[in-house]
Image: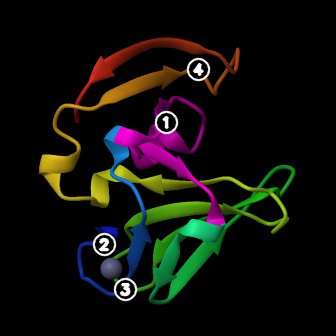
Amino acid sequence: MIAATCHCGAVTVEVPKPPGAVEVKECNCSICRRTGAVLAYYSPREVRVSGATDTYMWGDRMIEFHRCKVCGNFTHWSPVDRSRDRMGVNIRLMPPELTADIRILKFDGANTWTVTGERRGL
Ligand SMILES: [Zn+2]
């Protein structure tokens, strides 16, 4: 398992594969551009979250944005509808050597909802 850990260490998100082995997106939507998160996508069934989080929702309230109750780092989002098989984990909380040279898709979540380019590494 690969661990994404918040700054204070209270919250850990464990994923089965490194971010270089899954889809990773950097999004410019109203929340992602503010948090600066870069997200790797996994099935909620294969991810283990430990530690207390606060959540934030808005708009159609389809997903919960989780942040550490202690240090406030944005850790992941998860679907409110638990039958949805996708969640996003913030790779900025993963060890730097796992994110240094991976493919990151630029996603235009603000307007067109399409991939507009890519870059390598955080
Ligand atoms: Zn924390």
Q: Is residue 37 magenta?
A: yes
Q: Earlier in the sequence, mark 2 or mark 4?
A: 2
In the rendered structure, which disc, 4 or 1, sits on the residue that comes first in sequence?
A: 1
What residue range appears in magenta? 21-44
Tag nearer the camera, 3 or 2: 2
Mark count: 4
| Element carrying mark 1 | loop
Give yes or no for contact between labels 3 and 4 (Cβ–Cβ under 8 Å): no
**What amino acid type should be assigned to the residue bearing mark 4?**
Asp
Q: Which residue is under mark 2?
A: 6
Farthest residue in the left direction?
Answer: 97
Q: Of residues 98 and 6, which is closer to you in this image? A: 98
Image coordinates of residue 74 in percent, x first then y, are: 44, 63
Residue 23 is marked as 1
Residue matched to label 3 = 70
Residue neighbourhood size for the residue with mark 4, other residues' Cα within 10 Å, grouped as few (<14), some (14–19), many (≥20): some
Q: On screen, 80 above or below 37?
A: below
